[in-house]
């Protein structure tokens, strides 16, 4: 009997090995060797489907979402036949280790490794490597799969990838040209890096503004892998980067996470050294900002890592680098495949330790702040809850009581009161470390040289005051159910307050339905019922909408859709303040909005605006390519938005004159970030740069070469939060308090406007509330502009120094932008 059992085992194993060896290779499936062509996304998906159909006992394919351009998003689960039979049990055991699910895990000996490819579409070697990695795992690395589940996402950004691949396949020479000046090495705007809306998906993990990210997080949080790798590419002259990362590390990262990165790096180095491949570690790529494909998984318990291969969108199928060496796509695929397999190998060898340390990560709750209490407008609370829900972070509501802790608004420890409207987010939960990362007032910075911004605290981003309490604040999970509105057919009109983006969405919905709406520039109190409304409140008068069929039904239906509270009034005669017919109560124009796109504009900034109008406001815009600006008839538009960018080659004397003439007739320009350079210190515009006398110029030039980069941080602001003063009587600031926390992305500084309106500004010696700002850069911010308006003839120039739509996560800035479009200088005629 024993001999028979051994024979059966041998036969079974032989059959599995034979089955794997007969698996269709990428070459046989595609009809070409990997690296000799770029593979379109649908072909990659088809190959993964083919493998799953050939080896269903070891491969499971799951569609987890779809892109804006309707391309599918897939995951592949790869492991031994035994593990695949128990896949759901292994997943649940892992979540039990993390404390996400109740109960004790039945096993702690299977590692979970998640490999993510091609988040940047033109870093295209990694998706090619995903196919080779899949094939190699199943045909040559079966032993590793006995105690490891490998999850492969072959392409996080299919829209960007196909944008790049299709462009390259259309433009490459045959054979390919290695001369970097060849057209096949120079992508046109906007390039393949971003997704459909031109967002950088590798900066979106924490904020989850994009469709791809939202879909990914749902399935990622169902698994919470112990290792996550994000495959990238970098410049053609940097050979290969892999972990360990460089400081700054966020302080919640454990010693185990730090040390195991080194073990993984050493394992990679073994293979790279054997092949004579160059690489570097512990440079450039840190682990601080929470919205990357390495940091987000790290803060969720994984060993999160970035791997960077030389190449990027410039490399094509082959290119000569600065050392005269040809870098080929074949090389790039080999390197990424090697590190991917090496990662699985080291995970398999340390599966039990990975599980044990993963469990420990979620058991550590020694935080200075135990609870965060958030106070503010209910819409802003709801917006924050939406973010927390995406990450499956637990929250509740406070009771009527007292709280003591760090006050986000005053930057001091104070005492305060709580109410049942206040949101409470505490760290005594499985994802407590992520709570700390997202809410802490000021992130500890171990090194001022960082790869990204250094401030993102949720209370500032969402416009909420709050307390960080060292005591646990009791919270309940019951929220208030919004009351529905009812119509009043005898009402003169309906009034709604103006405080949040939900109010803005309500406004644009009615405008699209051809309903006329007014807004007030002064506070007023109605007579029946007696109620006071602040500046910006919306007034929908029946007499303005005589041609609207079912007027009341449409108002109430729209108000209920957006959970707005409408107040029906029976007279336009106010108890105090302006009556409905006052010049201070103006019609909102159904604005015709144009936005510049194409070269000169930052594709990221343009994408933020495009996404904002289409996906948030749901309001139409017209994109105008910068190449066509000279021929465009601006009289067809009320508003022209100029995204952050570099417009020196566009706004010459002729085009500037064209723009000024249009503005003087009633047009409105909204310029953002770098676009302000086109108007600063120019004749006809009052915008001026702040000039800081450089008394250290000679000394600076004597700084040793090796110290220049670090010394230069004194001149930088790497995403820091400042408290600005706001003139909330100005239409651009309706709905805001007299203070606003702005996220400043750089050291560019502009003087207060001598003619015009300084809507938001920094005063003397502005204080950094969160993030890093160099001492020299701080000096240049004294009495500097944040938002301003300059009147030119009948129109306006709106200057937005700090990009309020940056990555679409600074929620509290967005209403400024809506106000600028619809309320500011609303005297121009409607087209």
Image (spheres, rainbow, N blue to C red):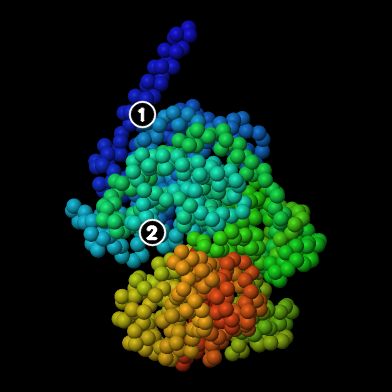
Q: Is residue 652 left or right of residue 566?
A: left
How many other residues sit within 10 Å of disc 2, few (<14), some (14-19) or many (≥20)? many
Say which residue label 1 marks. 20
Residue shown at the point (34%, 71%) measured from the top left = 599
* Residue pictured at 35% horizontal, 70% vertical: 598
Answer above or below: position of 602 versus 103: below
Residue contact between numbered discs 2 and 1, judged by CB atoms under 8 Å: no
User: Could you tell me residue 711's position as x and y percent?
Assistant: 51, 69
Left/right of residue 17 with respect to residue 406 in the rendered view: left
Rendered view: 830 above or below 95: below
Q: Quadrant of the C terminus?
A: bottom left
The answer to whether residue 727 shows anywhere in this view is yes
* Element under disc 2: loop
Residue found farthest to the top:
1
Quadrant in which residue 639 is drawn: bottom left
Percent from the top left, x then y, of residue 325? Answer: 27, 53
Labels in figure, total: 2
Read off the residue under disc 2: 193
Residue 669: horizontal and vertical position, in percent?
45, 81
Marks 2 and 1 sit apart, C-alpha to C-alpha, by 35 Å
* 103 in relation to 714, above or below: above
Earlier along the polypeptide chain: callout 2 or callout 1? 1
User: Residue 295 or 810: which is nearer the viewer?
Assistant: 295
Looking at this view, name the residue that lies furthest to the right.
401
């Amino acid at each position: 009997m024993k001999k028979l059992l051994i024979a059966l085992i041998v036969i079974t194993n032989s059959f599995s090995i034979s089955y794997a060896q007969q698996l269709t290779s990428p070459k046989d499936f595609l009809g070409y060797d990997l690296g000799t062509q770029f593979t379109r996304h649908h072909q990659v998906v088809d190959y993964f489907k083919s493998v799953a159909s050939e080896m269903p006992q070891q491969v499971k394919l799951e569609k987890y979402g779809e892109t804006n351009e309707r391309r599918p998003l897939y995951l592949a689960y790869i492991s031994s036949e035994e593990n695949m039979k128990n896949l759901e049990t292994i997943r649940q055991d892992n979540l039990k280790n993390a404390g996400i699910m109740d109960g004790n895990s039945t096993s702690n000996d299977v590692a979970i490794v998640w490999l993510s490819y091609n988040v940047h579409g033109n870093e295209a070697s990694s998706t090619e490597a995903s196919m080779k990695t899949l094939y190699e795992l199943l045909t040559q690395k079966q032993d590793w799969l006995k105690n490891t589940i490998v999850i492969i996402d072959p392409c996080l950004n299919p829209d960007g990838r196909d944008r790049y691949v299709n462009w390259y396949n259309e433009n490459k020479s045959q054979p390919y040209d290695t001369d970097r000046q060849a057209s096949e090495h120079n992508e046109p705007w906007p390039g393949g890096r971003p997704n459909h809306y031109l967002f950088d998906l590798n900066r979106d993990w924490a904020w989850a503004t994009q469709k791809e990210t939202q879909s990914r997080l749902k399935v990622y949080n169902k698994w919470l892998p112990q290792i996550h790798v994000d495959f990238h590419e970098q410049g053609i002259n940097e050979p290969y980067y892999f972990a360990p990362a460089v400081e700054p590390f966020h302080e919640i990262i454990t010693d185990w996470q730090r040390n195991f990165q080194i073990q993984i790096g050493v394992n990679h180095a073994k293979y790279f050294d054997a092949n004579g491949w160059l690489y570097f570690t512990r440079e450039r790529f840190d682990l601080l900002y929470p919205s990357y494909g390495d940091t987000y998984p790290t803060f969720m318990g994984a060993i999160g890592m970035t791997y960077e291969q030389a190449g990027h969108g410039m490399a094509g199928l082959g290119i000569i680098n600065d050392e005269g060496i040809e870098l080929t796509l074949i090389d790039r695929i080999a390197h990424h495949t090697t590190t991917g397999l090496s990662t699985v190998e080291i995970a398999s060898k340390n599966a039990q330790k990975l599980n044990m340390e993963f469990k420990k990560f979620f058991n550590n709750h020694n935080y200075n702040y135990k609870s965060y209490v958030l106070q503010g407008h209910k819409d802003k609370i709801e917006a924050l809850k939406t973010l927390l829900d995406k990450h499956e972070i637990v929250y509740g509501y406070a009771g009527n009581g007292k709280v003591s802790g760090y006050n986000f608004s005053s930057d001091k420890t104070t005492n305060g009161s709580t109410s049942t409207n206040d949101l409470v987010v505490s760290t005594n939960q499985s994802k407590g470390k992520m709570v700390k990362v997202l809410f802490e007032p000021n992130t500890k910075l171990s090194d001022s040289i960082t790869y990204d911004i250094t401030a993102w605290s949720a209370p500032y981003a969402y416009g909420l005051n709050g307390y960080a309490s060292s005591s646990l604040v009791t919270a309940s999970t019951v929220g208030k159910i919004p009351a529905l509105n009812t119509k009043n057919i005898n009402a003169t009109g309906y009034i709604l307050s103006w405080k949040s983006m939900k109010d803005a969405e309500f406004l644009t919905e009615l405008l699209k339905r051809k309903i006329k709406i007014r807004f007030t520039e002064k506070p007023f109190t109605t007579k029946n019922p007696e109620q006071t409304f602040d500046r910006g409140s919306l007034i929908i008068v029946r007499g303005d909408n005589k041609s609207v069929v079912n007027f009341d039904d449409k108002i109430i239906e729209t108000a209920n859709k957006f959970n707005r509270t409408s107040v029906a009034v029976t007279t336009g005669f106010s108890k105090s303040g302006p009556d409905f017919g006052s010049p201070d109560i103006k019609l909102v124009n159904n604005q015709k909005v144009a936005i510049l796109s194409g070269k000169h504009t930052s594709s990221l900034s343009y994408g933020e605006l495009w996404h904002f109008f289409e996906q948030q406001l749901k309001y139409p815009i017209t994109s105008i390519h910068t190449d066509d600006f000279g021929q465009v008839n601006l009289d067809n538009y009320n508003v022209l938005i100029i995204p952050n960018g570099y417009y020196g080659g566009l706004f010459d004397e002729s085009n500037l004159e064209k723009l000024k003439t249009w503005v003087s007739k009633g047009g409105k320009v909204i310029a953002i970030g770098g676009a302000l350079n086109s108007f600063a210190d120019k004749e006809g515009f009052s915008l001026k740069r702040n000039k800081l006398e450089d008394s250290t110029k000679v000394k600076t030039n004597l700084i040793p070469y090796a110290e220049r980069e670090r010394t230069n941080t004194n001149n930088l602001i790497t995403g820091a939060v400042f408290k600005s003063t706001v003139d909330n009587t100005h239409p651009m600031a309706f709905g805001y308090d007299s203070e606003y926390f702005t996220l400043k992305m750089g050291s560019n500084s502009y003087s207060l406007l001598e003619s015009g309106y300084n809507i938001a500004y920094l005063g003397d010696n502005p204080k950094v509330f969160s993030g890093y700002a160099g001492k020299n850069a701080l000096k240049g911010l004294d009495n500097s502009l944040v938002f301003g308006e300059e009147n030119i003839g009948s129109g306006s120039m709106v200057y937005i120094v700090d990009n309020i739509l940056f990555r679409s996560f600074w929620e509290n800035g967005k209403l400024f932008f809506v106000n600028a479009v619809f309320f500011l200088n609303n005297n121009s005629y409607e087209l």
